[in-house]
């Protein structure tokens, strides 16, 4: 009976059906493990053999239990967000769950933003957005899980605020939490000293604990899936194309009323009203921007999606969700954000614009970051 088998690494019940859930093991590996009387879930297996942490995706219920648990601990909470997709990074109600614990807000992927951007301005912006969500972080830090120097400074900041306490690292999926944790493991203990045995009480979730020098722990928690991200409507290949990998080179467009920009075939920006003005696009350098007349836009999309307008690729068009329209009136310098794709900055108030994204992906307006 499959239900009886538990992973000897983390204790999760072994299952072979849901790749993203705890305890997943491919059939073949399970068979082999049973023969050797040593069954690991795929996550623990990869951790043991490849020094690699995989993210486990949780249901909302399990995630709430986990957050409740964190509230009862005396710990520093490190909330990792993607500065490129702040709205898509929010953990709803996090401030209610952290209790009296101090929070460190970590804006990851700083390497993607133009170097000309002042860090002080960005951290201030993040702090304001956090306050709007009811979160009162002790400090806001920018980092990049890709840059060892940035990570060193992050570890110093964590050390400064944890003051002898455990550390819980929380974040939604795709913010780069696993990359960041893997980097911390490399820089601190090495994989052989990891502890993966204990569980969050009241849940089926395992926790990965990285021992700190004073015997305390840095604990990686599973990420919750944020459904309104591009990541959930595009295939892996397309995602690689639209997710920025290098420092973004902003593209400036002078538009007249009645003009449209297509971002490949995954998003669309209409300029409806407000006279000639400039718009700055912060999206992956690899994503082609196509300018056209608003009056022709619908027809162009119908004809060219999967052709001139890619991604999606031609064979994906049939399954690709239709674009849904959101209209905005600009009251102050603002960004129109396409969750997980990037944003368009509208400089002066007064313009009326519309942003389109695949059904299920959010388009939101926010106070301009830059
Ligand atoms: P998780 O779901 O939060 O664990 O996120 P992952 O660690 O799997 O990262 C999600 C994606 O973001 C991957 O494609 C990573 O390569 C990328 N990523 C993570 N950290 C950074 C970073 O600091 N800079 C950049 N440019 N990409 C990052």
Image (cartoon, rainbow, N blue to C red):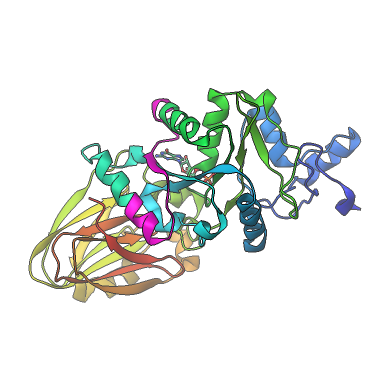
- The location of residue 354, given as percent across then percent down, is 26, 71
Residue 258 lies in quadrant: bottom left
Tell whether 220 sits left or right of 143.
Answer: right
Tell whether 234 sits left or right of 262.
Answer: right
Camera-nearest residue between 32 and 296: 32
Bounds of the magenta segment: 127-150
Camera-nearest residue between 16 and 105: 105
Camera-nearest residue between 76 and 293: 76
Tell whether 6 sits left or right of 217.
Answer: right
* Residue drawn at 70 percent across, 54 percent down: 18
User: Would you place residue 152 above or below residue 19 in this image?
Assistant: above
- The location of residue 321, given as percent across then percent down, is 46, 69
- The location of residue 267, given as percent across then percent down, is 34, 63
The answer to whether residue 41 is magenta is no
Residue at the limit of the structure toward the left, as seen here: 276
- The location of residue 280, given as percent across then percent down, is 19, 54
The answer to whether residue 142 is magenta is yes
Residue 337 lies in quadrant: bottom left
* Residue drawn at 25 percent across, 36 percent down: 115
Is residue 244 at all visible to an observer of this figure?
yes
């Amino acid at each position: 009976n499959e239900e009886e088998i538990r992973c000897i690494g983390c204790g999760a019940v072994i299952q072979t059906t849901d790749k993203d859930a705890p305890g997943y093991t491919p059939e073949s590996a399970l068979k082999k493990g049973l023969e050797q009387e040593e069954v690991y879930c795929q996550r623990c297996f990869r951790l043991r053999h490849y020094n690699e942490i995989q993210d486990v995706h949780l249901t909302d219920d399990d995630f709430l239990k986990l957050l409740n648990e964190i509230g009862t601990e005396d710990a520093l909470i490190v909330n990792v967000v993607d500065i490129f997709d702040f709205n898509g990074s929010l953990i709803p109600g996090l401030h209610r769950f952290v209790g009296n614990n101090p929070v460190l807000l970590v804006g990851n992927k700083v390497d993607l933003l133009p170097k000309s951007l002042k860090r002080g301005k960005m951290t201030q912006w993040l702090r304001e957005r956090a306050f709007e969500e009811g979160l009162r972080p002790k400090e806001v830090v920018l980092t990049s899980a890709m840059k060892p120097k940035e990570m060193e400074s992050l570890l110093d900041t964590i050390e400064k605020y944890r003051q002898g306490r455990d550390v819980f690292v929380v974040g939604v999926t795709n913010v780069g939490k696993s990359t960041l944790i893997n980097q911390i493991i490399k820089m601190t203990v090495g994989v052989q000293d990891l502890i993966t045995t204990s569980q969050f009480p009241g849940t089926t979730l395992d926790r990965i604990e990285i021992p700190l020098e004073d015997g305390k722990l840095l604990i990686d928690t599973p990420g919750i899936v944020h459904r309104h991200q591009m990541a959930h409507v595009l295939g892996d290949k397309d995602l690689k194309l639209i997710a920025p990998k290098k420092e973004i080179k902003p593209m400036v467009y002078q538009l007249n009323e009645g003009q449209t920009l297509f971002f490949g075939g995954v998003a669309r920006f209409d300029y409806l009203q407000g006279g000639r003005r400039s718009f700055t696009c912060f999206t992956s350098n690899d994503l082609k921007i196509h300018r056209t007349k608003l009056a022709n836009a619908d027809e162009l999309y119908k004809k060219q999606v999967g052709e001139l307008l890619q991604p999606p690729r031609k064979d994906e068009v049939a399954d690709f969700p239709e674009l849904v329209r959101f209209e905005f009136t600009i009251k102050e310098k603002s960004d129109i954000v396409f969750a997980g794709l990037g944003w368009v900055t509208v400089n002066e108030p007064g313009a009326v614009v519309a942003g389109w994204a695949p059904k299920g992906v959010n388009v939101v307006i926010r106070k301009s970051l830059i």
